[in-house]
Amino acid sequence: MLETLFIATLIFLFLNRSKRKRRPRSLDGELKELIATDQENKGIAFDIKNYLLWIIECNNNDEEKFNDLQLSKAQEIIDRAGPAAFYWMSDIAAQLALLSAAQINGIPTNVNVELGASATAGDVVRVVVK
């Protein structure tokens, strides 16, 4: 009975050994991990920025909203980046709404300083995502 339990434990540990995230044991390993994480985050931010600009372009061309291609690309970003991507896209949308309200009410913002009074939604996304 103990032998079966021991063998089952060994098999379980053997199968789950690669699922654990191993920490680098040296400073070089930690630096490489930080660089890789930073590059991945920049790639995700670039994908989100391009996705938002693409949605704005589709909206300007009166294309169908919520089509399968748009939804599949959004799902790819969420699968890659997790819930943070959804939060970040929502935050950008909220900032766009606030900037639009400020522009309508004549309240100056830092975007007005960088882009002037006639900023488009795409220009605002480029400034906000910097």
Image: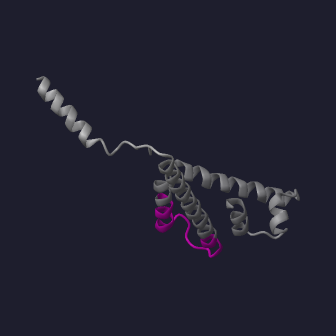
Q: Is residue 49 visible?
A: yes
- Image position of 8 with respect to 130: above or below: above
Task: Please state which of residues 118 and 19 is positioned toward the viewer in this rendering.
Answer: 19
User: x and y percent of residue 111 in the render?
Assistant: 80, 61
Which image quadrant: the C terminus? bottom right
Q: Residue at x 18, y 33 (%)?
A: 8
Q: Is residue 82 visible?
A: no
User: x and y percent of residue 113 in the render?
Assistant: 85, 63
Q: Residue at x 44, y 45 (%)?
A: 24
Toward the top, the furthest residue is 1
Q: Is residue 26 left or right of residue 6?
A: right
Toward the bottom, the furthest residue is 61
User: x and y percent of residue 9 in the render?
Assistant: 21, 32
Instruction: Tell me the magenta residue range.
Output: 57-75
- Give the main secondary structure, helix, strand or loop, of the magenta stretch: helix
Task: Please state which of residues 18 and 99 is positioned toward the viewer in this rendering.
Answer: 18
Quadrant position of residue 21: top left
Q: Is residue 12 left or right of residue 104?
A: left
